[in-house]
Image (cartoon, rainbow, N blue to C red):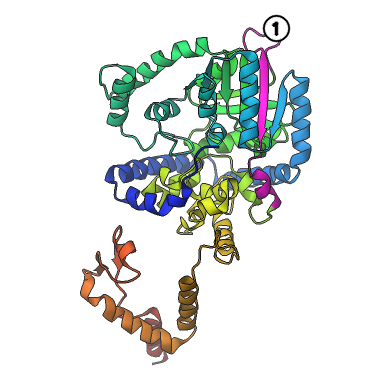
Amino acid sequence: MAEVTTRDFAAASRAAVQDPQLRRAFGSAGAGFDGARRDAIDEVTPEVWEQWRQQARSIKEHAVGNLDYYLELLERNVAAAGGQVHFAADANQANAIVSEIVRTRGVKVATKSKSMVSEELGLNHVLEGQGVAVFETDLGEYIIQLAEETPSHLVAPALHKTRGEVARLFADKLGVPYSDDIEEMARVARVALRQKFLDADMGISGANFLVAETGTLVIVTNEGNGRLCTSAPRIHVGITGMEKVIPSMQDLAVFLRLLPRSATGQRITSYVSMVTGPKRAADEDGPEEFHLVIVDNGRSRLLRDPALRESLYCIRCGACLNICPVYQRVGGHAYGWVYPGPIGSIVTPELVGVAQAKDLPNASTLCGACREACPVQINIPRMLLHLRHELAESPDSQRRTASDTDALLARGFAAVMSKPLLLKVARRLGRLAVKSVTRDGKIGRSRLPFLSRWTAARDLPAPPARSFSDIWRDELSRGDR
């Protein structure tokens, strides 16, 4: 499994907040993606969009609720089309399956289309350990591979890098003249990768959807690399999570309306590729072998938990990242693993272990924007609250996030808020405490207890001179007169 560093989220997020370039990159890109999403949605009526969302949710709810049946149906239909299905309980088993294919087929070069699950497995490092040259061919993933980094976004892996940083990276790693012209950089990457497609023994892809009734793997992309990876090499290996299965091609049509609009603001992506088994006798191209590796790796824990099961409905569009105020300030790497943002804060603790990622459920303002943006209506805030409660109340000290001090403060807060007289006294004391550090209605950087971490990175409005209850009481009094 890829190295897990999510326990350092607090430190990583503090460092990210102090990086102005990172904040500009994620702020502008997130706004751009979300603006394009809204424009694409506005092309249809609100009623139609909500109807599509509800249809998609119903499909996923049904498929996940009957996952055993649809996985068996998928396996039968992949086999009927000439392919092979491999089920992997965890990352080690998935890597062992691919490694065995590599060993027995003499694979020396592998090209990869974008695959978040392969990142989850740490597959590149495993194959490189076997002497296989592995090349990411999605432009964003290729940049990340050259930089020896991990993706920072579900859709745009190199979102955190500036044009100049990529230009310097290409000059250093590929030995080309420095140029920050985007078309020129794309041309350089195309030239560098073109021969790799022809040399590859194995093509590796992820899957956006698996259609059970036909045994079809579906990927949606805006680059031609996906089709080259799945058709040019003699072996195609698809790797994906078990939750990607949907019942039928009719159901796929619903998701093809939602995913591009939610991810990039497109009506449809440049390429929608459907792979059903290996090359047939009448086909001009295609792989000689097709292997589909379906990975659990902790997903069954989500499936068993009624409170978290709907996280498996996610179609990895990234809409919740683009609108999340926390993600936009700290970026994807602060989350420490493959899946960042609001949805990552739910699935990561379950996939890698809560002890490794117990800070993530608190990496949210609970503003609810992610739920509104989600094309499958996933109630992310509710699940984050559930995880927070589970962690705060856990009898296991390795899992528990609330200290005895936190519990004491919570009881004190509840006591103050439930007694009007105590609340009135607390408000007055609070105004006096912050008076010396208040400028122009804002509390600046300070060393006041409980405030310094907040004010180190953002403004905090000073308490108003009069409370809402004071204003409300005066209005009622005037009304009586």
Q: Is residue 290 magenta?
A: yes
Vertical arrangement, residue 333 with respect to residue 134, above or below: below
From the viewer's side, name the closer residue of 478 and 343: 343
Residue positioned 29% across, 21% down in the render: 171
Residue 64 appears anywhere in the view: yes
Direction from residue 436 to residue 392 in the image, left or right? right
Magenta residues span 278-304
Snapshot quadrant of residue 435: bottom left
Image position, residue 53 (x, y; %): 61, 45
How far from the left and from the top, in percent, is residue 454?
A: 33, 63
Determine the secondary structure under disc 1: loop
Residue 130 appears at what percent x and percent y? Answer: 55, 21
Name the residue carrying label 1.
282
Residue at image position (56%, 44%) is 375
The C terminus: image quadrant: bottom left
**Tag 1: amino acid:** Ala
Q: Is 453 placed above or below 198 here?
A: below
Answer whether residue 414 is magenta in the image.
no
> Percent x, y for residue 125?
50, 28
Quadrant where the N terminus sits is top right
Q: Residue at x 65, y 22 (%)?
A: 100
Q: Examine the image and state in which quarter residue 90 appears.
A: top right
